[in-house]
């Protein structure tokens, strides 16, 4: 039954004198509130899923920013005219470790 049909029934009961003005207003309010709650429930579920997805995205982005910041501490200065910074390779790390041990 649609909202319009239910409202028509309430109006008919009011016109017939079976409902007082206060009872009619209360029943109408409950009907409209109940319907709007049912209609909003699926939307709120979808919004909570979107919110959770956005939180995960934000957390992932924060982890990536933190890793980039931490990664800067591991970079070494390259020799040469440009003197850039880069992460050491596995081979260069093993070579430096071997030289340090000797």
Image: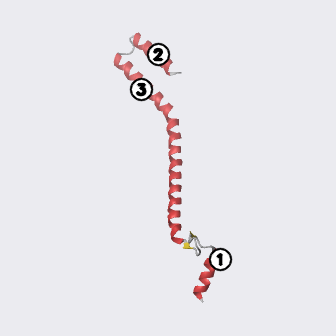
Select label 3 or label 1 by which is in front. 1
Q: Mark on residue 30?
A: 3
State the residue in front, 88 or 41. 88
79 above or below 1?
below
Q: Mark on residue 9?
A: 2
| Inter-mark Cα distance, 3 to 1 | 74 Å
Disc 3 is placed on an element classified as helix
Q: Quadrant of residue 34?
A: top left
Sequence-first disc among 3 and 2: 2
Residue 38 at x, y percent in the picture: 49, 31
Disc 1 is placed on an element classified as helix
Residue 16 falls left or right of residue 2: left
State the residue in front, 45 or 100. 100
Sequence-first disc among 3 and 1: 3
State the residue in front, 93 or 60. 93
Select label 1 or label 2 by which is in front. 1
> Which quadrant of the figure contains the C terminus?
bottom right
Specify the farthest residue to the front.
81
**Where is mark 1, residue-wise?**
91
Q: Quadrant of residue 18?
A: top left
Disc 2 is placed on an element classified as helix
| Inter-mark Cα distance, 1 to 2 | 83 Å
Q: Residue at x 49, y 38 (%)?
A: 44
22 above or below 63?
above
């Amino acid at each position: 039954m649609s909202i319009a049909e239910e409202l028509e029934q309430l109006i008919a009961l009011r016109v017939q004198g079976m409902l007082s003005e206060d009872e009619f207003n209360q029943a109408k309010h409950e009907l409209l509130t109940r319907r709007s709650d049912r209609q909003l429930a699926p939307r709120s579920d979808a919004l909570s899923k979107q919110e959770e997805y956005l939180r995960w995205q934000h957390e992932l982005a924060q982890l990536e920013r933190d890793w980039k910041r931490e990664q800067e501490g591991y970079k070494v200065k390259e020799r040469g005219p440009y003197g850039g910074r880069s992460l050491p390779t596995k081979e260069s790390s093993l070579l430096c470790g071997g030289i340090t041990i000797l």
